[in-house]
Image (spheres, grey):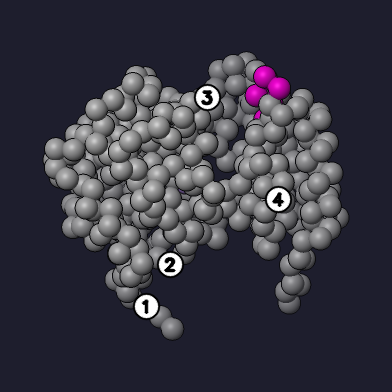
Amino acid sequence: MSHTVSEYLTIPEPRRAAIERLALEFVPGRRVALSTHMNADGDGCGSEVALALMLARRGLDVRIVNPTAWPDLFDFLLEGVNDQTSTGSAAFRNLDLLIVLDISDVKRLGNLAESVRRLDVPKIVIDHHIASDDPAGTIVFTDVAACATGELVYDLARVLDYEITPAVARALYAAILTDTGSFRFSNATPRCHAIAADLLAAGVDPEEMYVRVYASAPAGRLRLLAEVLSTLGVDEKLGLAWLSMNAGALEHYGVRQEDLDGIVEHARSIGGTRLALFFRDLGYGKVKVSFRSTGEVDVNDFARQFGGGGHAKASGALIAGSLDEVRERVIASAREFLTRAPRPVAVG
Ligand SMILES: [Mn+2]
């Protein structure tokens, strides 16, 4: 059955209802803070900027307050947006409304989590992760079927008839582009492509976005990548591949946190890989592990063993221990997990 592009853009009824509930809070003059997870990515930043610009046009007084500094990579989106991240939780003073984007668990707000728990104003969550027991707010608009939080912000604009200006379109395109791995992951649905088409029509230049997001790397990024690739471990029988990074490598190569985005994809790019891992030693007795899968393997399920989570095909966890200890433990569990996980059905 084929659909026209506009049919794909039809907004599912539960989403429309959730958006209409949120809209009751968008009262002109209200002071609103937007926040997203630690080490904001393209979806967190893009969703924040798009919503900030639209709510400001509605007459709300909007500021962004994130737990960690705005990534340089997405500076180009910030024009005309008030980023109060450096003020910390003091920026929550005299607030009327909080909106948390791209987070299912309040703990992902890091050093802002406690202040957010205590905030006594309406708290909205807009997200597409698997639900947690501890959300950052009580008015929750979430759908795991959305390719990105940016898809839900796009729907919000359409339901509430907020204008998608070229700046809003760029922010939403950045969100969708990055969360779908440049439209390569399984979440790059027909609907996601239809939204991208609409954003291109609204003024996004796809080559400019490619250059800004993927082709503006410092040389150190490639030198670091070369070092990380040299740590490759593979278990071809099980379809397991892993990469590691030592503490201090970012500083050594003069690169930033966001230069690591997508590094785990190199492990996943090996034919037959079902589970790819990236171990990053944070240098204070903790290791950040990224989990990516192909096919039927549910990494959200796997990451939960280590107190983490996220999506079925992309998750993460922060694990205490040295790099060697954590790697040994996680790989042992991964071998067990993959032995039990369903095998892909042979094709042809
Ligand atoms: Mn996201």
Task: Name which residue type carries label 4.
Answer: Phe
Q: Which label sits on residue 3?
A: 1
Report the magenta residues as a range: 280-285
Instruction: Name the residue beneath numbered marker 2.
Output: 190
Q: Could you classify mark 4 by the number of other residues whose Cα lies within 10 Å: few (under 14), some (14-19), or many (20 or more)?
A: many
Three-letter code, disc 3: Arg
Amino acid identity at mark 2: Pro
Residue 138, how many percent across, how many down? Answer: 39, 48
Q: Position of residue 306 (x, y in %)?
A: 70, 41
Q: Magenta region's main secondary structure?
A: loop
Residue 21: x and y, percent? Answer: 27, 57
The secondary element bearing badge 3 is classed as loop
What is the C-alpha distance between the residues marked 2 and 4? 28 Å
For the C terminus, give its image quadrant: bottom right
Q: Are marks 1 and 3 in contact (CB under 8 Å)?
A: no
**Above or below: residue 244 compared with residue 138:** above
Whether residue 128 is visible, yes or no, is yes
